[in-house]
Image (cartoon, helix red, strand yellow):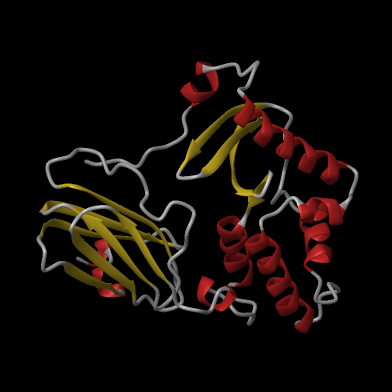
Amino acid sequence: MKKQLMVSALLLSAVACIGWNSDQREVVDSYNTLMEDASQENWHGLARGFSDETADLLDDIAVIYTAAGAPFNNQGEELLASLVSETDFLVFSDVVVSVEFRNEKAYLLSEQGGDVRSYEFIRDGSRWKLNLVQDLTQYFNEAMQGTGLPSGSSDLTDSPTYISTGSGSCEFALRNDLEHLSIWNVYCSPGNSDSWGEDWLQASILGSGSEMGIWLESGVYDIRVVDSDDNVYTLWQIELDEDGVFWPVTALDRDELD
């Protein structure tokens, strides 16, 4: 069966990163600054090290919780202070395992007590900034379940979006028609492959009503989608040509319901 790629113990033992090139050093320096600000409870400095999308999402969540009676004064920085001080949501370790670059983003792996964590950084001018949009959305979607507060990424990022990726001449299009669930992973691989390969969504999230177009060359493909509750949806041996394929993903497509 096809398997998703996972971080394994081999990653930790493969490289003892004792030196970095200039690009990696910039990411590590940004990470170290975040760690220092967190240790000194410099919440304003910590927030300045986040991507604009992360800062905006923190403000949006703070507004939701303030309306429910939490003492955040509609301020993302006050929510951030509570997150770092009272939970293990954001834990920095001085053991940096690796720094890799993919699709104009940087991914830093750190290790804390045997727990490997991945941090995504995006370039903002001359500085690499931490992007926590996906992590925040997942964390608070789970926290809000059963509380009466809004849940589902569509409540935190409520505008449907369209994501286009790939460089082929044929479009495989899908739309999130799931109720109160976001799509977190989309895998698409040739039908004769034994690996799902990379996640086409990367760090993006497909909220309710949002669509994605994957541009591929004509051929036979398998498509797999994973939602924010880890439900899996799979289409096998789909023939793709210039007419394209459209898949509105619904609860009826879930694998265990087949």
Q: At x 74% / y 50%, what residue is drawn?
A: 49
Viewer can see residue 114: no
For residue 92, what is the image quadrant?
top right
Question: Which residue sits at x=27%, y=56%?
Answer: 224
Check the picture and name the quadrant holding the C terminus. bottom left
Residue at 56% across / 75% down in the picture?
151
* In the foreground, 237 or 129: 129
What percent of the width, then of the height, locates residue 213? Answer: 30, 64
Residue with the most extreme front position: 125
Residue placed at 24% from the left, 41% from the top? Answer: 2
- Left or right of 64: which side holds 159? left
Front-lying residue, 180 or 245: 245
Q: Position of residue 237 (x, y in %)?
A: 11, 54
Residue 194 drawn above or below residue 246: above
Residue 36 percent across, percent down from the top left: 84, 39
Q: Quadrant of the N terminus?
A: top left
Quadrant position of residue 43: bottom right
**Relative height, residue 167 to residue 160 (above, below):** above
Snapshot quadrant of residue 172:
bottom left
Residue 186 in the image: x percent, y percent? 34, 56
